[in-house]
Amino acid sequence: MIKANPSDAVGVDLRDVQKWYGSVLAVRGVSLAIAPGEMVCLLGPSGCGKTTTLRMIAGLEKPDAGDIRIGDTLVNAVSPWKRNIGMVFQNYALFPHMTVHENVAFGLTMRNRPAGEIRAAVEDAMAQVRLAGYGDRRPSQLSGGQRQRVALARAIVTKPNVLLLDEPLAALDKKLREQMQVEIRQLQRAVGITTVFVTHDQEEALTLADRIVVMEEGQIVQIGSPADVYERPKSRFVSDFIGFTNAVGGKVVSVTGTTARIETASGHSLDIPGAEGVAAGDEVDLVVRPEKVAIDPPEGSGCVVVEGDLVHTVYSGAVTYFHVDIGRGAILIAMAPNAHGAASALPTSGARLRLGLTPDTVLVFPRRG
Amino acid sequence: MGQLTPALAGGAAASPPRRIDTGKVLSLGALLAPAVLLLAVGLLWPFLMMLRMSFLDRFPDPTGLTLEFYTAVLTDTYFLRIIGRTFALGLVVTAITAVVAYPVAWYLARSRSRWKHLVFLGVISPLMVSIIVRTIGWTIILGNEGFINAMLTSLGIIDTPLRLMQSFWSVVAGMVHILIPFMVLSIASVLGKIDPSYAEAATVMGANPVRTFLKVTLPLSVQGIAAGSVIVFCLTVGAYVTPVMLGRGQVNVLAVTIHEQMVVLVDWPTGAVVAMVLTAGTMVVLTLYGLFLRRHAQR
Ligand SMILES: Nc1ncnc2c1ncn2[C@@H]1O[C@H](COP(=O)(O)OP(=O)(O)OP(=O)(O)O)[C@@H](O)[C@H]1O
Ligand SMILES: [Mg+2]
């Protein structure tokens, strides 16, 4: 069993790291401290600089400004082959001219370890990813999930200081992806290795990470635990990205303490607690997750009731989304699990629906641009 | 009948699993016909004529078949030396071309410099100039009053001109120059298709640039080297103009000998036997290449 001594695990520290590609500033001043043994997910839309950040930790790109430390060592000028890193590439990059065994052994061979030790370590790693006995195959003779595991074994067999994974599951189908998420998490825990995982799939980030780092246009816009990021996105960008699909316009009428009274575009008045950074008169967006909108709430449940006409229904298997016009064209989407009954029992377009909003699930952000 | 499949429309009996799509076969045949015709008329027919001629007891007016000329050629040190020289020339030229071409191919495949196009033009420039002109260029460089001798003499390093022409190595130099574009283009096309993440993966796993090259990039580009080598080897052992012009009669190779036997000495069967030896040599190389490809296709 490959297992780092917990005291061996080292952290990674990025300070004001910048990277230019020609005239494009791909990473603009990223600072991030990753604790020893921690699993951090870099999450963000395409082109926000996740891969570039990862490649700078690996040493495959040189930062144009800022410092990168692995443990106590400043690695800015350390060549990638001296950094002791394990990396899984998006396409796995398994060497096609080598067997699976040779692939996994590669890092140890490069470290000039004795043959016996290499064989034992490779078998160990292969067993850990449940691929014992596949050593003689070529990568082309493996399924996508198996290749993924070989890439993982190859990355951890050298007991690296840091494990870097760049969208390692993007090429797998949904079911396999979910299974591999669990396996990677278990493996990372078991080995106790400091890990940076890149994804643009919010669910993946929530499932895997100790902490999520949300990036936008080369910058970090929020760092927090999965629950933090999920429940309390700090900006409209993060809320969009993390699944707050409802946005209703409004105007701040007054602010008392941290509670803002807001007049919505649909003509409702809501008191939202914890609204920061807004003042009376501001144009704002109210955002809320569809699953936090109650359908036909019981009387006295303490939520604000709004009524509207159902304009559109999206049936998506486990749940159904109801698009409701709550007044003056403002649409609020409510989600309900399809707990019982057939789809035919769902309300149809034109039906009048009562929806309940719990103020502390509603977030207020200044209207963008 | 809207749902009539092309296969049925083609008239073939629909009996899966071995359904022959006549339409497809016909159109394929039409596409291949010109090439097949050209090969048959330009290559196969002369080859068969030559093969037959190599077994005739005399030509013209043969009276029977014999192995006499094969025995004669393959036991005569004069011919054996030419055979050896020709294939040695092929191997040496191929090896030097590969070594010289690889870095250039690497540059062409990887560089994003705006000078890349100029380098590319430079590489293929030997193909744009007639072979005679190119070879005369080498004569100017290597001749007794040529550039190299003039320079060495004026620097006082030598006082009598070196015999650079008429030597095996002058032919090698000329051949390498002519054939380098084929090698560069073969290797570059393969290098360009190698995903850079293989080399990056090796680097991250602790391989320095030299080991990354030897363990990953070179093995992955071996197909390009092989393809280029086959082209260069076959063109070298069959070359006529360069050995004649730069060797000046002193570097006899198979192609020159074939010409000599058939046209100068009018000994057709001996010339045909020598031609068969040359063909056999290139066949061996092509067969090895075929085996190599089959092994590589499996991964
Ligand atoms: N080699 C390069 N040359 C020039 N620009 C680059 C290069 N690599 C990345 N970029 C640019 O840098 C920015 C960040 O790219 P990066 O690959 O880090 O994004 P990403 O977050 O990984 O995106 P994705 O989710 O699509 O992989 C992008 O605007 C991209 O176009
Ligand atoms: Mg990326």
Image: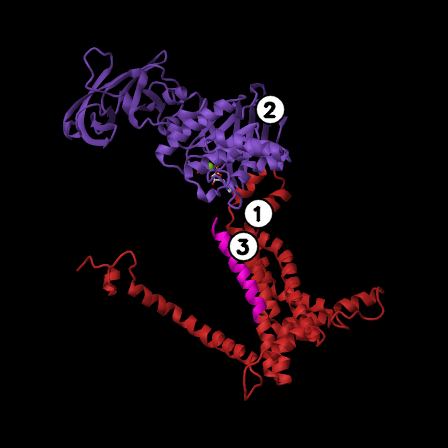
Tag 2–tag 1 contact (CB < 8 Å): no
Q: Give the crowd class for mark 3: few <14, some 14-19, many >=20 residues within 10 Å.
A: some
Given residues A141 and B201, the one toward you in this image is A141
> Looking at the picture, does residue B164 appear above or below residue B7?
below
**Disc 1 residue type?**
Thr
Is residue A152 among what the camera can see?
A: yes
Q: Is residue A13 left or right of residue A358?
A: right
Q: In x, y percent, where is residue A224?
A: 44, 21
Q: Chain of mark 2?
A: A
* Chain identifier of the red chain: B
Residue plotted at (85% across, 69% down): B159
Q: Which residue is mark 3?
A: B223
Is residue A80 among what the camera can see?
A: no
The label shown at residue A269 is none
**Disc 2 residue type?**
Gly
Q: Is residue A254 magenta?
A: no
Q: Spatial distance from mark 2 to mark 1, Cα to Cα?
A: 32 Å
* Chain identifier of the purple chain: A
Q: Is mark 1 within 8 Å of ligand 1?
A: no
Q: Give the crowd class for mark 2: few <14, some 14-19, many >=20 residues within 10 Å.
A: some
Check disc 3 and report its element: helix, strand or loop. Answer: helix
Q: Which residues are magenta?
A: B279-299
The label shown at residue A71 is 2
Q: Spatial distance from mark 2 to mark 3, Cα to Cα?
A: 43 Å
The label shown at residue B217 is 1
Badge nearest the viewer, 2 or 1: 1
